[in-house]
Each structure stands twice: as C-alpha cells, then as structure tokens.
C-alpha cells in the first residue's frame, strides 16, 4: 500500500524539487510537554536557528566552565539532532547585543558591554586579558555564516561609530539591516547621560551616517531595545516606553502616533510581542500583538522600591499600523506575565512561554531582589493564542503542561524545523551562578516543547523550491493520499507557510515573521493532490530577503520545515513582478470499485456553494476511497 503511494507520488513530482521533508527524528514525544534534551554550554541570552540543524547561542561574558581559546566560552552552536553543543568565540563582550539576518544569509550581532571581570564588574583592561579576555563589545559588529560542518565561527567586522548596548535590529526590504538605539554603558534602564537615540544602517553608509529618532529622545528611560517591525507599506512601526512612531526609513522621518495603553511593553517590562500571520485572507496586512509587560511610569524605573513583587500586566492590545494608528483591545492573558515570549507555530497559532508573574527583566545587588533577580513567581505554563479564534476565545491551555524550569530574565526560544520549540537560558545573575542557595540560577538546560501535532504523521510534500521570489511563476507541490490522511478534501484547507524564526533575546524574536503563500489545488482521482503555490507577493517588505523555513500544513499538521532563501540572496533592491495567476481549484471524483473518474471544478475562489458541491462529492467518494484502502491491507 505504502509502496504504491510512493510510486504515484514520484510520478507527480517535478524537477523543481529542492528537498523533500521527512518525519521528525523523535517519534514518541510527550505532547504538550516540555522535555529537557541537552546542555547549551553558554546561557542562551540570545539564540537563533541558523541552519536546518544548528541553533546559535550568544551569552554575555561570564565564568562559564567551558573554555575556548584559553578563556570561558560565551557562545555556542547547538546541534538539534545530536543535542550537543560546540563552544564558539564571539571575541568581544556580547552582553545584551542585538541581532538579525542579512538578505545574503549572513547573521549579524551588534553591540554589547565593556570588558568585565568576575561579578560582571568593569575590567581594568578594555582590550582583553585575564580572566575573561573579553575586549569591549560596545561598538562591535560580529558576523556569522551558519554551517553544518562545525567549521564556522563569529568574525569581527568594522566596528560601529557609536556604542550600542541593547540595540534593536530589523532586516529591511533590500536585505540590509537597520540598527536602532541603545546606550553607552548599560544599567537597568537608560538615562540622558548615556543614551544613543540614533539609528544607522548595516552595511554602514558614511554618507547617511546616524539619524536621531525623536521617539527615542522622548521616551527615556525605558527606550532600550525599541520594538520594531518592517511593515508591508515599507515603513517601520517603532514602540518604546509609552510612545509609538511610524518611521519612514527611506526619508528618515518619523511620525508620532498613539500612546501605548495599559503597560510598558519594551524591556525591562518585556511584553510578549509578535506580528500576526500575514495571509491572503488579510491581504498581507500587518497586525502587531503586545501581551503583558508591566504598568510602570517613567519615574518609577528606580531600584528604591520592591519591583520584584510588583504584579505584571495581563493586558493584550493590537495595532494595524498601515490601516489605523490606534491600539485595539484584545483578549487578555489568562494570567499576568512579564517576559512571556511569543513564538509562531506553523499552524498559525502563537505559543507563549517563559516569564514571570511579578517583577521585570534585570538584576542587581539590591535588598529586595531574589538573590539578584528583579522578577519572581515564574510562570511555568505555556499558553496558545489563536489569531483566528473569536474574541474571548483566543487563549487556550488545553492539553498543555508546565515546565519544571523557571525561565525569566535572559531566556530565549525559537521554533525548530520539526515544529517543536527550543527553549533555553534564564540567568538573572551578574555572573555564572549555580550556587545551591540561588533560586534562579544560570540555566544551561535546553528544553523542547512539543505542540499537540508533534507525533502525527507529517505530510511529505514533494517539489518544494529552494528559493522564493517576489512574484513570478507559481510552482506545484505534490501531496500523496497518505499526506492528506486518506481524504483528498484535506487539500482544501492545506496551507503553505514561510516562517522566519528570528533572533531571540529579551522576550523579542527580532525579525520573526509568518507569511502564508497564496495557493490553489488539484485533487486527483487516486486521492493525491497537487498544490499550485504562488511566490511571495511582489513586495519585499512583506518578508525581507534572507533565509526562512517553508512548511506545508495539512489538517493543522506541519511538514518538517525546509530552509529556503527568500529573494535574490543578495543585499540589493529585490526584483519584483506580478504573480502568475493560479489554476482554479478542483477535486476529481475519487476512484471507486466500479465508476469511472470525472472532475468537478470549484473556480478559484472558495465560495461556500462551490465548496459544498465538492465537499459532497468527496464525502461520498472519500469514504469509498478509504474502504478501498482498508481492503488493500
Ligand atoms: C553578506 O553581506 C555582508 C555585508 O556586505 C558581508 O560582510 C558578508 O560577507 C556577505 N555574506 C555572504 C555570504 O556573502
Ligand atoms: C554584586 O554582588 C556580587 C556578589 O556579592 C558581587 O560579586 C558583585 O561584584 C556585585 N556587583 C556589583 C555591581 O556591585
Ligand atoms: C490588498 O493590498 C494591496 C497592496 O497594498 C492593494 O493594492 C489592494 O487593493 C488590496 N486589496 C484588497 C482587496 O484590499
Ligand atoms: C502545475 O500543474 C498544472 C496542473 O496540474 C499544470 O498545468 C502546470 O503545467 C504545472 N506547472 C508547473 C510549473 O509544473
Ligand atoms: C484511479 O484512477 C486513475 C485514472 O483512471 C488511475 O490512473 C489510477 O491508477 C486509479 N487508482 C486506483 C487506486 O485505482
Ligand atoms: C473529508 O474531509 C472533509 C473536509 O475536511 C470532511 O467534510 C469529510 O467528512 C471527510 N470525509 C471523510 C470520509 O472523512
Ligand atoms: Cu539583558
């Protein structure tokens, strides 16, 4: 039976195939649970998926026991398939750096802190030397070309002209990166004496240089790591402290818009934030979700009161900046949460995990801190947000179990190609600290969270491209009858999804994005089907060029994602052209023991009457097909 299906599938496959995803390596995962799978070597303050199998971890300089080049390692490469870490050398102090990926696939990590010694105190030498040999990272630009042969490492590039501790990065539609904000020498929040309220572009253009952002000037002291998204209009949404602005990065002009309601969302309040999926149904219109954080006024960012026991916010709001400049109330979180990280699942839902019920990000030697942590009451349970659910029903914890590991300040998370979510880090300590009496230790344990679809047989779509363009000819992807669960009607709701997993740090995944490609289908009489799939919309601001994962989701179950290149693979104005019109959707009558096959066509739109007609045909013939399958066993 299975062999027969393979033959049919092979016959349908075309030459455009880059790689056909298989099944996950883990076959009996504890669904809805976290599982401890390995050791990250360095604490995962910053983390991103770089290849199909490798996750890169960047920490601040500290007394990690693993050594590299004669000093502690504060970066690592983690093999997902082997659950094994390899120490790496980021050279300078990458403490609270920012990161993103260029349109040519190179990852960039910028900024950081001065050289430190034990306890996170400033070192005498800012150019290296014992104990940590961590030159000042304030101006640093570090580049990495991810690899699967364990041969790659970070390379220092020309430094920036100003210091940036806690900068935000966002990849732009030409594959370059905007680097925004930060401060000179850090601290809990920013102050007028050390703020860097400017942005610049990488690769650096001296003719453009630095531009001052009025938003950053006006939102001290909580203006570090400003929350930033490239919008499909080509503008950027920037959110900092209680302020919001639209930045036109081409003219370098800014417009102040609505104040953020209810809570501060940026670090250290640290809400969970994400752009909701961009889909044909919403015409690729961006809505950004902010959940949790903390209601702290600008004059309250001082350490003279017990912030660690101050309850976080449960409020969620959205904004659709290309359409309206007002915030809109959304379903609140089921419990208050600071540092609850939002991670896309390929099924279009968002997983919220990590965080604390009281306090905020940050640490220090103050009497009220929990040892050094400025947060307490870790929230251990994951929750899932469904953007398509009705108001009042968006959050769910059904079938989900708690983690055993508090993950608060300096924790991170990323979606993996197999549809699980890797979670690591948490280190509200100035230096590596695993002392028994420290409640929130430096955390090296890596967990995987397994969504409820994880153990289902995954679709194995054939004919996936290795590159997507902005418009142009469509491509065909074949799904076997088995991929469709023995019911060809499943193809009607099948989606093709591109996800950029982003650069995870401080409760943000910079650059994280979910884009559904337009598709139609042809269901074949043997129960298999062909998807006809458009390229991305002819607008590189929908998804900036660079690497991303491609999934096909059948009945809510994703294929194992394959890494593809979005755009030309170069940092340049991306070529765009109209998408070629897709064939109309159609499902052929299914084979039965006696009747010959025919064909019914629905037309390209999924109008309810047309779907009903097809649905009726499929109900009958799908049932017969399944009987046939049963008989063949
Ligand atoms: C990508 O572009 C950057 C900036 O120009 C360059 O440093 C890097 O080497 C390029 N990467 C590749 C893979 O060409
Ligand atoms: C905070 O206290 C720890 C432990 O006592 C010490 O190692 C560290 O240097 C102190 N940090 C500062 C900034 O004083
Ligand atoms: C969808 O968005 C595009 C680009 O912004 C616009 O030209 C078009 O009119 C929109 N279509 C609908 C149906 O809103
Ligand atoms: C895709 O499939 C359709 C019909 O099934 C066929 O007409 C078309 O030529 C195919 N296109 C490509 C690019 O393979
Ligand atoms: C279904 O019908 C098609 C077209 O007649 C034929 O090519 C195919 O082999 C049939 N499959 C089965 C399982 O009978
Ligand atoms: C096949 O799927 C369709 C749409 O999902 C559903 O309505 C129908 O009941 C299914 N048929 C069978 C035989 O399971
Ligand atoms: Cu930090």
Image (cartoon, rainbow, N blue to C red):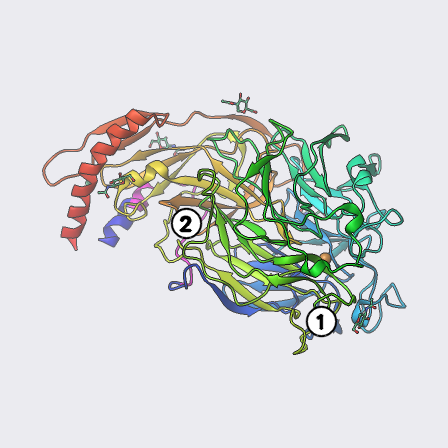
Name the residue at 62% across, 49% down: 313
Given residues 261 and 593, the one toward you in this image is 261
Residue 288 sits in quarter: top right
Position of the C terminus, as image quadrant, is bottom left
Quick check: 130 left or right of 605? right
**Numbered disc 2: secondary structure:** loop
What span is colored magenta in the figure?
9-26
Q: Mark 1 highlights which residue?
A: 432
Taking the image as four quarters, which one is ligand 5 found in? top left
The reply to whether the magenta stretch includes residue 13 is yes
* Up-down relation of residue 305 to residue 333 (above or below): below
Q: Is residue 578 visible?
A: yes
Q: Residues within 10 Å of mark 1 (few under 14, many from 20)?
A: many
Quick check: 67 left or right of 624? right
* Up-down relation of residue 297 to residue 401 (above or below): above
Q: Residues within 10 Å of mark 2 (few under 14, many from 20)?
A: many
The reply to whether the magenta stretch includes residue 164 is no
Question: How far across and down, in percent of the image, does residue 159 sit?
Answer: 82, 51
Which of discs 1 and 2 lies nearer the camera? The answer is 1
């Amino acid at each position: 039976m299975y062999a027969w299906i393979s033959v049919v599938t092979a016959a349908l496959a075309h030459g455009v195939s880059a790689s056909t995803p298989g099944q996950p390596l883990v076959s009996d995962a504890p669904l809805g649970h976290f599982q401890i799978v390995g050791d990250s070597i360095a604490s995962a303050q910053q983390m991103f998926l770089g290849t199909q199998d490798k996750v890169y971890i960047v920490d601040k300089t500290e007394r990690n026991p693993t050594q590299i080049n004669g000093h502690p390692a504060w970066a690592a490469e983690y093999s997902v398939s082997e659950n094994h870490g390899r120490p790496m050398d980021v050279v300078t102090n990458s403490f609270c750096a920012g990161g993103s990926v260029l349109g040519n696939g190179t990852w960039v990590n910028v900024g950081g802190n001065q050289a430190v010694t034990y306890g996170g105190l400033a070192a005498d030498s800012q150019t290296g030397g014992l104990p940590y040999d961590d030159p000042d990272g304030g101006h640093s630009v570090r580049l990495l070309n991810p690899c699967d042969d364990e041969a790659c490492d970070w390379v220092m590039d020309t430094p920036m002209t100003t210091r940036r501790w806690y900068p935000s990065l966002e990849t732009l539609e030409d594959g370059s990166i905007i680097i925004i904000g930060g401060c000179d020498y850090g601290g809990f929040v920013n102050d007028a004496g050390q703020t860097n309220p400017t942005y610049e572009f990488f690769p650096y253009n001296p003719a453009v240089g630095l531009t001052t952002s009025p938003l950053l000037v006006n939102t001290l002291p909580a203006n570090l790591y400003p929350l930033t998204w490239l919008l499909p209009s080509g503008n950027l949404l920037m959110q900092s402290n209680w302020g919001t602005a639209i930045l036109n990065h081409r003219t370098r002009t800014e417009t102040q818009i609505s104040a953020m309601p209810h809570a501060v969302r940026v670090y250290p309040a640290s809400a969970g934030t994400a752009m909701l999926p961009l889909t044909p149904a919403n015409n690729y219109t961006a809505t950004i979700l902010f959940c949790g954080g903390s209601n702290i006024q600008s004059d309250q960012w001082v350490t003279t009161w017990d912030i660690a026991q101050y309850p976080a916010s449960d409020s969620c709001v959205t904004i659709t900046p290309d359409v309206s400049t007002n915030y809109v109330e959304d379903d609140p979180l089921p419990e208050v949460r600071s540092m609850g990280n939002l991670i896309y699942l390929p099924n279009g839902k968002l997983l919220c995990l990590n965080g604390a019920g009281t306090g905020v990000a940050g640490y220090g030697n103050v009497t009220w801190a929990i040892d050094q942590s400025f947060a307490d009451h870790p929230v251990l349970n994951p929750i899932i947000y469904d953007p398509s659910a009705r108001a009042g029903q968006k959050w769910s914890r059904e079938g989900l179990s708690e983690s055993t590991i508090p993950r608060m300040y300096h924790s991170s998370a990323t979606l993996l190609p197999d549809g699980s979510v890797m979670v690591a880090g948490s280190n509200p300590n100035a230096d590596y600290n695993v002392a028994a009496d420290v409640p929130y230790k430096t955390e090296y344990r890596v967990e995987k969270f397994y969504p409820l679809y994880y153990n289902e047989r995954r679709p194995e779509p054939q004919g996936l491209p290795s590159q997507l363009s902005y418009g142009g000819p469509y491509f065909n992807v074949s799904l076997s009858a088995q991929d469709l669960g023995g019911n060809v009607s499943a193809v009607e709701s099948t989606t093709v999804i591109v996800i950029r997993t982003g650069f995870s740090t401080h409760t943000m995944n910079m650059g994280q994005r979910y884009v559904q490609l337009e598709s139609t289908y042809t269901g074949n009489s043997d129960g298999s089907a062909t998807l006809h799939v458009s390229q991305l919309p002819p607008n590189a601001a929908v998804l900036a060029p660079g690497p991303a994962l491609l999934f096909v989701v059948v009945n809510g179950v994703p294929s194992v994602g394959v890494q593809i290149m979005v755009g030309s693979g170069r940092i340049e104005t991306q070529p765009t052209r109209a998408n070629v019109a897709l064939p109309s959707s159609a499902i052929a009558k299914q084979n039965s023991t006696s009747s010959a096959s025919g064909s019914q066509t629905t037309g390209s739109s999924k109008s309810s009457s047309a779907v009903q007609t097809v649905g009726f045909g499929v109900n009958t013939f799908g049932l017969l097909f399944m009987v046939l399958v049963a008989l063949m066993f």
